[in-house]
């Protein structure tokens, strides 16, 4: 057993899962924003990065890790709510491409802003859990306390998001507002408020992903989330934008694919993993592996 | 009571409603009749705040609804069943009903059982997605979803559209019963003038955005000229 756990195969499995959960979290944030607004936020990664950078400046002043996480998430949510109110609200009723273009532009602004304030070098947070791999009778098992934390966190958030949409009044109102805004207003639902809440929740979950990246061995730099966003976006598309479980599964699948390509082929083609899975998924189940609904426009 | 006063609505250069005035008394059904493009749907959408009028007022008892947000008008007790029914297809029957009850602060369990009693077919299909419902079932769901909030006013936009005559007749009976038992103010927009006039207390006839007749339903129904020119009913 020990030999198996410390085999290079399992090394790749654990490594793939560790990367995959970050994609899963980004995908979850996209599921939230899709379910509650039917818009996809292309600046999701950059917003999360900025929120985490603000959290990290606070950590420099001596606050603990968990406070940094809380500040990043709160700043992320505030940024999400503000973005919806200021940048997105004037675009309702306009062509669907408009919010996409605006958010791609905003992405550039945020990344430039972060680089201007904090420089474009990598910054990281000292994590509260050890990054040192476990050992079993002298054999390395390529799993650390931090990776376990990462995986449990993603699963925990997935369960919360699923429960929010399935069981709560807020979740029902969020979904209704996205599906049928006019009818929802006729039923007395404050649709404008729901859209803001949708953006806030989504940006909050996105910030968790960026905090984890910043806590990892390689840290976070201003454009770091771009590639992660693309992988998370593919994960959400593969899993189905309506399904939190699909988002997490999609993220893990892409993380694993990248890791195995990296290990057995070449690090240079690792990012192809996501694309290959996307193409396969679109050929087999274009609506998403875990999605029930058939017609979806992205 | 709903009091519409001098209401005018423009869509660009098109005048959808021209100085429309009438009263819809409490506990009565007021039928709003007229051909396509007469302004019937625009009238209901203006009352609900979905369309901003150029001029005029709509009072629900003492409150002027003009300028209020749609969701606040709904929270005052104005239930609007839109044209095409507006059930949210991706949600289940029960989720649609829960949405109706959310902002009204009514007891959900009580409301649900009351609606399932009134429309047993909805109880049988409560976990089904609305995309699987028939036209008649959707209309019942749309009505139930409005009623679960215990509205004071019910705005019904073409409830008979696309329904078989028997289903329409049953629906009209239900509307009449509701109005009598719950003391509702009902504004019933219909192209099907005959079946609407059968249950309505009062009738307003619109033609190209203007009121051409306004009175009790029987006298409107008895007026051959109105029927011939505006209601498309063959005079025998």
Image (cartoon, rainbow, N blue to C red):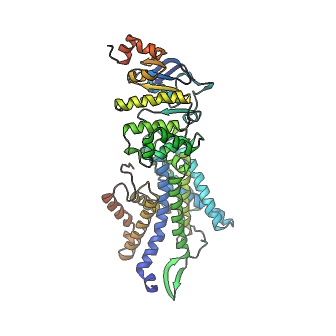
Note whether residue A56 is visible: no
The foreground one among A95 and B49 is B49
Question: Is B203 left, or right, of A72 in this rendering?
Answer: left
Quadrant in the rendering for residue B63: top right
Residue A195 percent coordinates (x, y): 53, 46
Q: Is residue B46 above or below residue A131?
A: above
**Residue at image location 41% in from the left, 31% down from the top:** B170
Residue lying furthest right in this view? A62
**Residue at 53% over, 77% down:** A144
Q: Position of residue A228 (x, y in %)?
A: 46, 62
Q: Quadrant of residue A64?
A: bottom right
Residue furthest toward the bottom? A137
* Above or below, comparing residue B58 to residue A193 in the picture: above
* Quadrant, the N terminus of chain B: top right
Give the percent coordinates (x, y) of residue B6. Answer: 54, 17
Where the C terminus of chain B falls, by quadrant? Answer: top left
Q: Quadrant of residue A3?
A: bottom left
Residue A171 visible somewhere in the drawing: yes
Query: Which is more toward the observer, A239 or A12?
Result: A239
Closer to us: B217 or B73: B217
Q: How many marks?
A: 0
At which x and y percent is residue A66? 64, 66
Between B13 and A182, the one lying in front of the other is A182
- Residue B33, above or below A37: above
């Amino acid at each position: 057993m020990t030999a198996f756990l410390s085999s290079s195969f399992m090394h790749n499995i654990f490594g793939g899962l560790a990367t995959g959960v970050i994609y899963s979290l980004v995908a979850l944030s996209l599921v939230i924003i899709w379910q509650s607004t039917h818009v996809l936020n292309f600046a999701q990664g950059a917003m999360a990065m900025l929120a985490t950078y603000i959290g990290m400046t606070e950590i420099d002043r001596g606050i603990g890790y968990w406070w940094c996480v809380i500040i990043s998430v709160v700043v992320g949510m505030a940024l999400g709510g503000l973005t919806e109110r200021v940048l997105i609200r004037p675009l309702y009723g306009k062509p669907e491409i408009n919010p996409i273009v605006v958010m791609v532009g905003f992405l550039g602004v945020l990344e430039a802003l972060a680089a201007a304030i904090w420089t474009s070098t990598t910054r990281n947070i000292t994590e509260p859990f050890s990054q040192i791999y476990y050992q079993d009778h002298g054999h390395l098992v390529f799993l650390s306390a931090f990776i376990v934390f990462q995986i449990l966190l993603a699963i925990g958030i997935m369960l919360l998001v699923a429960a929010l949409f399935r069981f709560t009044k807020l979740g029902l109102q969020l979904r209704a507002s996205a599906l049928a805004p006019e009818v929802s207003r006729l039923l007395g639902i404050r649709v404008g408020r729901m859209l803001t809440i949708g953006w806030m929740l989504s940006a909050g979950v996105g910030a968790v992903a960026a905090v984890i990246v910043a806590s990892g061995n390689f840290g976070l730099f201003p454009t770091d989330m771009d590639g992660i966003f693309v992988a998370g976006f593919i994960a959400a598309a593969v899993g189905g934008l309506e399904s939190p479980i699909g988002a997490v599964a999609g993220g893990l699948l892409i993380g694993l694919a990248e890791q195995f390509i990296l290990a057995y082929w070449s690090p240079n083609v690792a990012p192809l993993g996501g694309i290959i899975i996307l193409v396969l998924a679109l050929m087999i189940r274009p609506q998403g592996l875990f999605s029930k609904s058939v017609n979806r426009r992205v | 009571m709903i009091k519409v006063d001098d209401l005018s609505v423009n869509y660009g250069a098109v005048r959808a409603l021209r100085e429309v005035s009438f009263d819809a008394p409490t506990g009565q059904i007021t039928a709003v009749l007229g051909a396509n493009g007469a302004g019937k749907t625009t009238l209901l959408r203006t009352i609900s705040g979905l369309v901003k009028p150029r001029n005029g007022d709509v009072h629900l008892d003492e409150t002027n609804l003009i300028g209020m947000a749609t969701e606040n008008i709904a929270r005052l007790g104005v239930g609007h069943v839109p044209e095409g029914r507006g059930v949210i297809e991706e949600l289940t029957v029960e989720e649609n009903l829960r949405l109706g009850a959310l902002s009204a602060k009514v007891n959900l369990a009580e409301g649900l059982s009351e609606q399932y009693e009134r429309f047993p077919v909805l109880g049988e299909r409560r976990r089904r997605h609305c995309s699987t419902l028939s036209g008649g079932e959707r209309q019942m769901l749309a009505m139930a979803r409005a009623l679960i909030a215990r509205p004071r006013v019910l705005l019904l936009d073409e409830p008979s559209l696309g329904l078989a005559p028997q289903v329409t007749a049953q629906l009209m009976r239900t509307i009449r019963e509701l109005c009598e038992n719950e003391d509702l103010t009902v504004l019933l927009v219909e192209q099907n003038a005959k079946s609407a006039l059968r249950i309505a207390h009062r009738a307003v006839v619109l033609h190209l955005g203007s009121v051409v007749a306004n009175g009790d339903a029987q006298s409107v129904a008895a007026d051959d000229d109105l029927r011939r020119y505006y209601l498309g009913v063959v005079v025998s």
